[in-house]
Amino acid sequence: MDMTVGNLFPKLFAFAVPLALSGVLQLLFNAVDLVVIGNFSSTRVVSLAAVSSNNSLINLFVNVAIGVSLGVNVVMAQAIGEGNKEKAERTVHTAMLLSFFIGIAIMLIGTIGARQFLVWMKANPDVIDKAYTYLFIYFFGAPANIVYNFGAALLRAKGDTRRPLVFLTVAGLLNVGLNLILVIFAKMDVAGVAVATIASQYVSAGLILYALVREKGELHLSFKKLRIHKQELARIVRIGLPSGILSSFFSIANIIIQSAMNSFSAAEIAGNATGISIESFVYTSMNAVAGTASTFSGQNYGAGKYKRIKKVMWDCVLIEVILGIALGALFLALRFRLASLYTTDEEVIRVAGERMTVILPFYFVCGVVEVLVGCMRGMNYSVLPTAASFLSVCAYRIVWVFTAFRIRRTMFVLWLSYPISWIINFFIDGVMIFFVYRAVRKKKERLGEGGESLRADE
């Protein structure tokens, strides 16, 4: 897909829909873990809380790598926009070798420190043993998870969002089948869910590697050429690492919130996690639009078409608002029915519904912020939005836990920190992107119309 010419909206739609479906399918298959464990485990509520309460801790490590994969996507998109096949080839081999190293590092850290991490999070005594079992097994799938995300980022940089969708579908169906076998028939409880998850992750990683090896042109992967190219590594890290660091800060803030949440009962912990799982379908759908904005901005930045980046931004913001409000209203109306799919426990369902009542009406604001950040990332500005999000979201939520929550120790107070932080971040990023775009335009005017001279200056 050439994102630098032609009618923009149909291309945005063609790119974003498979990307959104990929995210939704991944969530559906992850939700199956919770649905199976919540309905068929002999210790349903405790097992559900054990699996679901690990999300913040897992994201602390995995999201750093996924943030770096955003840098891979932008660097590759810019290389394609420039028409620089040599740079694209170096990016492919640098990215895939980097993904392997990162995946191994996360696996070692996660498996060795799993129990201690849960202790630091003040995990509920009724939950900690099962949570540790799940976490320990899950981290063995980290290399496959990271390899898949880096490979998918490369394919998406050239507009291919369909094959990652197909690969996730195959892996997800395997996950569902193994969940049913290992939990219902083999009675493996949380261990069965974890084994099913990592098996599906290795299948998706194998499929993405096969696709890249069979790929023709600049995205072709040759294992003999795997090496770290310093220039491409530096660009990937410069663009992607701030996003990864920000994701880790988000996770740290969420871990602190989860630690505060762990002071409540197992049913309340499970209800909060169930609400998060359901809300994730809205977030993932909107995040696909933000990923679209980032990739389109990257290709057009590489081609030196800066006016088109502005149109990408406004179109994606409009889509995000409509999508966020529509999905938020739909899920809000169905919140108790959706929660009842996870469990029959009335307390869990009640808590999940109450959480969604606070969060869902404001989710579209979060989506708009992601689009603004994605456009800035596509224009090689990653540090500024990272700093803004750190202050207005991460630091704010941590302060909120140690101030407002200490005054009034209720789940409602914890939940309220999310929409307030999104609104603050929206105003900061809204002002910031105005200055970023103006800076890019001025740089172009100063260096002339040649895109190469602008990129060389950077």
Image (cartoon, grey):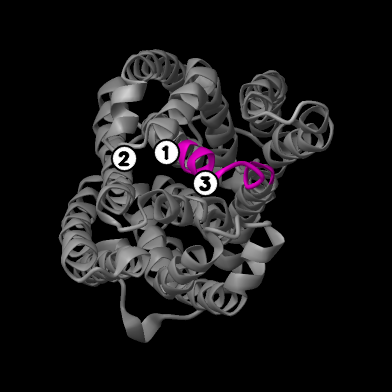
Which residue position is annotated with label 2?
342
Write the residue at 60% across / 71% down. 115
**In the drawing, what numbered circle is on residue 145?**
none
Alpha-carbon neighbours of circle 1 within 10 Å: few (<14), some, or many (≥20)? Answer: many
Alpha-carbon neighbours of circle 3 within 10 Å: few (<14), some, or many (≥20)? Answer: many
| Residue 140 x/y as whole percent | 42, 75
Alpha carbon separation for disc pair 1 and 3: 12 Å
Report how many numbered discs are placed on residues in the image: 3
The answer to whether 427 is drawn above or below residue 380 in the figure is: above
Alpha-carbon neighbours of circle 2 within 10 Å: few (<14), some, or many (≥20)? Answer: many
21 lies left or right of 412: left
Instruction: Give the foreground label among 1 and 3.
Output: 3
Q: Quadrant of residue 85?
A: bottom left
206 lies left or right of 51: left
Whether the magenta-drawn stretch holds residue 268 is answered as yes
The answer to whether 110 is drawn above or below residue 127 in the figure is: below
Residue span colored magenta: 260-271
Please state, as top left, top right, bottom left or bottom right, where the N terminus lies in the image: top left
Q: Quadrant of residue 81?
A: top left
Alpha carbon separation for disc pair 2 and 3: 15 Å
**Which SS type dominates the magenta stretch?**
helix
Write the residue at 34% across / 35% down. 3
Which residue position is annotated with label 1?
274
Kind of residue at badge 3: Ala
Write the residue at 49% across / 19% down. 364
Badge 2 vs badge 1, beta-carbon distance below 8 Å: yes
SS at mark 2 in the image: loop
Q: Can residue 307 be seen in this view?
A: no
Which residue position is annotated with label 3?
266
Kind of residue at badge 2: Tyr
| Residue 150 x/y as whole percent | 41, 61
Q: Earlier in the sequence, mark 1 or mark 3?
A: 3
